[in-house]
């Protein structure tokens, strides 16, 4: 039993509050003034994963929030640490994932006089956070901690920020006073932030009418539906109505890619011809071509389901339903169940999607079945796909980034379970790979984590392979090594002039970089592979070992396209 006359300092009080509100993991980099905070967090039962760089730790925190539904917490030092952490905070905002960034800051009495690592951190985080708080006295710690955690998950999830000046971390209060402050702050939490919006029943009825009256309906779902854990409700809705479905890249797996109503392989047909699209937890942004022609038909009617009223107001769909995806889809299914309708297997719309999918899959399989050496992108991706499928349940979490590597991976790798794909996401963020791997290993310790990355994406945070080894995470990182961004130096030498024309190309890295040896230098396992047999054997060994490994896959530098499928934007 703790002695009530004992004192606690600000560091301990922050850790107590985080633990009291259910935070049990933190990601970060320690240093002045937050080293004690990390240690106190550990003493309060919180697992602290220490990184080399706040950027990767921030990416990890954002993905952890998505995978678990509880905000991932990033701890950084002041000034430059906070600035590095903005990468994670902004990534959380862009992807609508819950995350809390906590940074130490310089002493309040020196504000504006050039203190060590001084920065107006509240101003710096403003564009990237939905809420921020600064505790200016130890007594403000409990309410500040609880409000940043509550705001991160309220409505559309996102990043929040807590500023902790170093002086308040060293202030002290009696333990009994600390407990009183915590109890008071807990009882004063804003209930509106915690409660989910109520679903409007008349909108549900309208949605059912629209789906019932459609000739070519489609259900589209995205990472908002994945975050809401709506997989069971979506499966029931799809299977009871026979409506085909299309996941966004990270929606993949809510229903298995192998499901007979999956329209993924007939994407252009499905979105180009559908007349009513029920879009659940996915924004009509660039990833969904803004819901506009020429990709979508001119007269498609959208039913948008989103937790954010602002999102619905922005897109102006035919019908908008504000609510949690799991709740709304569950109620929709219940409403339909009482008066069922089903697009049977021989319905022309269903048949056309199935036939198109079959043709496209058959065409892709012809390409995939070839063993091309030196490796292009498809041959190793097929071998990786088969190895991942061989793992069985629970399925591995796949992390994917890069231009060609991610594009090819998205269509070739098969997702059969919800929240098993993490990629560059809404913001097209490169460099997320290692942070996401660590988040996945922490969030789902029973799963193998497999990263399929371009060498450029890997390089952003390659030093975090040491973190993999230190914590012995079951992560296998497969690096598609083609010697640079897009494929190294592809320039026509005659077009390069000027005094620096002999410099390496802006797109190129050292050819033949030995990334596998980087992993070995820390005691992990490294493989260098350039043939199908070598790759198969490395995958077999590393997947069954479930230990940190890097497989360095030599790719033909001339394979693939510049910018992947985004060439028109570069
Ligand atoms: P994707 O990239 O998969 O298309 P987006 O990130 O664009 O997905 O969209 C996700 C959407 O899901 C956001 O508009 C967000 O407001 C919404 N969302 C987040 N949580 C929920 C939830 N619990 N229920 C419904 N929608 C949600």
Image (cartoon, rainbow, N blue to C red):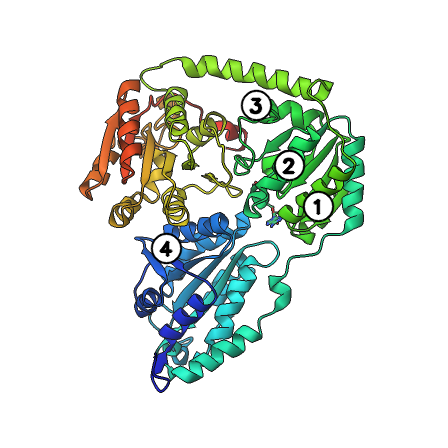
Q: Are marks 2 and 1 in contact (CB under 8 Å)?
A: no
The residue wearing badge 1 is 331
Q: Nearer the viewer, mark 2 or mark 4?
A: 2
Cα–Cα span, label 3 and label 1:
29 Å
Q: Which mark is residue 410?
A: none
Q: Residue 137, can we see it? A: no
Residue 119 vs 313, above or below: the answer is below
Q: Residue at x 34, y 23 (%)?
A: 557
Give the image quarter of residue 346: top right
Front-most of residues 450 and 515: 450
Helix, strand or loop at disc 1? Answer: helix
Q: Are marks 3 and 2 in contact (CB under 8 Å)?
A: no
Q: Which mark is residue 54?
A: 4
Q: Are marks 2 and 4 in contact (CB under 8 Å)?
A: no
Helix, strand or loop at disc 3? Answer: helix
Q: In the image, is the residue at mark 1 within 8 Å of ligand 1 by its beta carbon?
A: no
The residue wearing badge 3 is 265
Q: Judge the density around disc 3: few (<14), some (14-19), many (≥20) Cα neighbours within 10 Å.
A: many
Q: Nearer the viewer, mark 3 or mark 2?
A: 2
Mark 3 or mark 1: which comes first in sequence?
3
Mark 2 or mark 1: which comes first in sequence?
2
Residue 482, horizontal then vertical, whole percent = 33, 27
Mark 4 or mark 1: which comes first in sequence?
4
Mark 4 or mark 3: which comes first in sequence?
4
Cα–Cα span, label 2 and label 1:
11 Å
Residue 9, horizontal then vertical, whole percent = 36, 78
Mark 2 or mark 4: which comes first in sequence?
4
Mark 3 or mark 2: which comes first in sequence?
2
The residue wearing badge 2 is 236
């Amino acid at each position: 039993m703790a002695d009530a006359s004992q004192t606690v300092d600000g560091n301990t009080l922050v850790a107590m509050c985080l633990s009291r509100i259910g935070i049990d993991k933190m990601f970060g980099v320690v240093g002045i003034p937050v080293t004690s905070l990390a240690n106190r967090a550990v003493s309060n039962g919180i697992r602290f994963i220490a990184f080399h760089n706040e950027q990767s730790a921030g990416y990890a925190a954002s993905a952890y929030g998505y995978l678990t539904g509880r905000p991932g917490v990033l701890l950084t030092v002041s000034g430059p640490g906070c600035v590095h952490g903005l990468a994670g905070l902004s990534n959380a905002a862009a992807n609508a994932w819950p995350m809390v960034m906590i940074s130490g800051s310089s002493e309040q009495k020196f504000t504006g006089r050039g203190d060590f690592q001084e920065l107006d951190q509240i101003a710096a985080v403003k564009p990237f956070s939905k809420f921020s708080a600064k505790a200016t006295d130890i007594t403000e710690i409990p309410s500040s901690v609880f409000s940043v955690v509550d705001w991160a998950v309220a409505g559309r999830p996102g990043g929040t920020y807590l500023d902790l000046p170093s002086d308040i971390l060293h202030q002290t209060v009696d333990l009994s006073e600390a407990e009183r402050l915590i109890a008071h702050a807990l009882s004063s939490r804003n209930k509106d932030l915690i409660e989910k919006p109520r679903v409007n029943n008349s909108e549900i009825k309208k949605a059912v009418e629209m789906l019932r009256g459609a000739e070519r309906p489609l259900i589209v779902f995205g990472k908002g539906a994945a975050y809401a854990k709506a997989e069971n409700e979506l499966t029931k809705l799809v299977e009871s109505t026979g409506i085909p479905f299309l996941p966004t890249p990270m929606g993949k797996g809510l229903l298995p890619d192998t499901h007979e109503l999956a329209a993924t392989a007939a994407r252009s047909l499905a979105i180009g011809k559908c007349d009513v699209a029920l879009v659940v937890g996915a924004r009509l942004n660039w990833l969904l071509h803004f819901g506009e022609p020429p990709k979508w038909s001119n007269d498609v009617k959208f039913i948008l389901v989103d937790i954010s009223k602002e999102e619905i107001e922005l897109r102006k769909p035919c019908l908008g339903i504000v609510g949690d995806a799991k709740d709304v889809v569950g109620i929709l299914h219940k409403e339909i169940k009482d008066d069922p309708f089903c697009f049977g297997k021989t319905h022309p719309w269903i048949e056309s999607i199935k036939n198109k999918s079959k043709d496209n899959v058959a065409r892709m399989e012809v390409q995939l079945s070839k063993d091309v050496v030196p490796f292009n992108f498809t041959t190793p991706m097929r071998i990786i796909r088969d190895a991942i499928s061989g793992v069985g349940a629970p399925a591995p979490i796949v992390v994917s980034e890069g231009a060609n590597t991610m594009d090819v991976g998205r269509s070739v790798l098969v997702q059969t379970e919800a929240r098993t794909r993490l990629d560059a996401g809404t913001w097209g963020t490169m460099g997320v790979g290692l942070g996401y791997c660590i988040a996945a290993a922490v969030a789902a310790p029973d799963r193998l984590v497999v990263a399929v990355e371009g060498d450029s994406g890997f390089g952003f945070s390659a030093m975090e392979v040491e973190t993999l080894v230190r914590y012995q995470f079951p992560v296998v990182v497969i690096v598609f090594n083609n010697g640079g961004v897009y494929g190294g130096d592809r320039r026509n030498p005659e077009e390069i002039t000027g005094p620096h024309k002999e410099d390496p190309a802006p797109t190129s890295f050292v050819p033949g970089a030995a990334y596998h040896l980087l992993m070995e230098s820390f005691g992990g396992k490294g493989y260098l592979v350039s043939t199908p047999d070598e790759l198969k054997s490395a995958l077999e060994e590393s997947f069954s070992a479930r230990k940190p490994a890097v497989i360095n896959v030599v790719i033909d530098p001339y394979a693939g396209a510049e910018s992947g499928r985004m060439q028109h934007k570069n």
